[in-house]
Amino acid sequence: MIKTITFNFLLVFTCSITLAQNAEGVKHIETVKKELINSKVDTNRVLQYVDLCTAYQWTNSDSLQRYSEKGITLAQQLNYPGGEVRILNSQGIALFFQGNIPKALEILFKGLRIAEKNNLPLESAICLNSIGSCYLFLGDNLKSVAFINRARAIDETIQHAPRDLYWKIYIAMWSGLVYSDLNKLDSASFFLQKAYNDAYTPGFTDLYSTRPTILMFQGNLYFKRGNYEKALNCLHQSLETYDLYHDPLGTADVCTKIAEFFKQMNKPDSVIKYAKRGLDAAAQFNYKSIVRISSSLLADQYEMKDIRQAYYYLKLELAANDSLYAPKKILELQKTLSEEQQHQQQILEEQTEKQNRLKQNGLLAGLGVLLVIAFILFRNNRQKKKANILLQQQKEKVESTLSELKTTQNQLIQSEKMASLGELTAGIAHEIQNPLNFVNNFSEVSSEMLDEMNEELNKGDIDEAKTISNDIKQNLEKINHHGKRADAIVKGMLQHSRQTSGTKELTDINALCDEYLRLSYHGMRAKEKDFNTDFKTDFDNSIGKIKIVPQDIGRVLLNLYNNAFYAVNEKQKQNLNGYDPTVTVATTKRDGRVEIRVKDDGNGIPQKIFDKIFQPFFTTKPTGQGTGLGLSLAYDIVKAHGGEIKVETREGEGSEFVIRLPAS
């Protein structure tokens, strides 16, 4: 899963000097547009397009697209790659803000290649800093600090013009943030103080953009050091500045961070106050990452106060999470990283080929005079050392790309967990309908019986009225019974929706198997109206309770049940004579281990794919019905519990999955 980093205001990684919602920003935009009408067709005109793209990158994607196309076309006509790179950087930032990380990285890598090809140090540093910010969002802190360090190393060699000084400040700010997230607090403090000092350089006027951001980052650092008073003081100063300049994006960031701090300080009322304010501000511009975080905070706080509110904010969180981490976007990210890996491999091959040609030419030229041979050999030796350095750098880039692919796999695993939660919720909704129907029916019957009792009382038939009264009492007891049952189901749903703490606890494995079997069955019935199958259980009551993480083992069972019901349902669709679809679940204890067997009489697993079923991303389901991570996730969870999972299958007859867990 993409890691939720300590500091969640990731989209503040460029200068907001011309934000469209800010009064000064609107004035600046209108000034630039007027200048653009009469400006000459030269590089200054490209820079005017750069200003407009920077202004619209947060708030108006249509305007950004229009001016970026014009700016890039003019920059290419004038052979001005620096302007093209800056516009590409604005496009990447806008896509990042919209939650399209794969496309953002693709454009930022493109800008970086153009900048490096044309030896543009400042533009290279800008792209490297933005790419590092993307990797911080993906949870790859080491990759993030590598890119940001490269950006800072380049930036320190540049003599900045006044209009570009804010890049120096922002690179220092982001260096402080990433080191803070790595818990290297002294380094984080050094860079944040450096950013603060540079922000007050004489002649630099962009304080309303940089100052509240630095204060926000410093507040986070103070909180990590346990100085809550200074932390909240910095955050409130930051919030006052954002309010002063009417910056809802900054307001959303800092309010959400304040809410997170109050949650750690166990102040629920303050959490709700600032989380709601952050959510309202983020919703103005569909700031998805903050919508997700603030909704999660509110859902957690309302869980024990107002279940409807908790459910409402949980739906907001899931919608934002799906928008940011949908499987399609994860696959696009994987494609982008793969293409970048191929690009790095191509560079490596070209470098190797170039070195080979240089060696051949050196040998041919060295066949002349011995003195010339000695000189050429000396030169080739130096070139070989340089080539080795370049090859080592390319090797490190390739290894880094492989690490990125592993991160992507973890993100897909998280998507599978969220899909599992959706299926579980559907099952619970179907399950809870039964007690609600009982409550409604007995309520209506009791109302009618009260009318009958009144009639008997009016007639003077006391005995009959007492009989009806006893029946009403029994109905009320049944209403109370089914109401408690519905309450237990809702509490179980909320407990399942929480992220597991990873703490093992004593659990009745038979009850857990039975609960998730019924939830899976009803979930299948909710999705497939014509689905109808039989399921049987054979539980060993001598097992007792064993130590497991119930939510994790529950996910494993839910996945196996879903696969089993899917298999028998697919076979049932073949209309085979005499076929009786059945899923059987059995538990037993032997040799100090607990066995859980999930058996179906579906079509079984073909032998040719048998060895691949536990591999990540492998699935036999049609496109859109499975990510291929369910069994892989189940394998990892069971292994983490010190157990094992096996499968026995016969093609055409069915499959049986066997989970073995330590009994103590």
Image (spheres, rainbow, N blue to C red):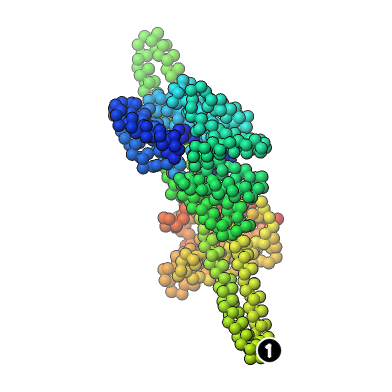
The residue located at (55%, 32%) in the rendering is 214
From the top left corner, tell me how far across and down residue 404 is, in percent: 49, 39
Name which quarter of the figure residue 8 lies in: top right
Q: Nearer the viewer, residue 573 or 519?
A: 519
Q: Is residue 378 visible?
A: yes
From the top left corner, tell me how far across and down residue 375 is, in percent: 41, 11
Total marks in image: 1
Q: Amino acid at mark 1?
A: Ile
From the top left corner, tell me how far across and down residue 276 is, in percent: 55, 49
Q: Residues within 10 Å of mark 1 (few under 14, many from 20)?
A: few
Name which quarter of the figure residue 98 lies in: top left
Q: Does dot 1 land on a helix, a strand or a loop?
A: helix
Q: Nearer the viewer, residue 213 or 116?
A: 213
The residue located at (40%, 8%) in the rendering is 371
Q: Quadrant of the C terminus?
A: bottom right
Relative height, residue 521 to residue 222 (above, below): below
Q: Is residue 174 left or right of residue 546?
A: left
Q: Is residue 395 visible?
A: no
Q: Nearer the viewer, residue 403 or 40?
A: 40
Q: Is residue 36 left or right of residue 624?
A: left
The residue located at (57%, 47%) in the rendering is 275
The residue located at (62%, 74%) in the rendering is 479
From the top left corner, tell me how far across and down residue 256 is, in percent: 56, 44
Q: Is residue 260 left or right of residue 164?
A: right
Q: Is residue 472 left or right of residue 383?
A: right
Q: Identify the residue position indicated by label 1 in the image.
A: 462
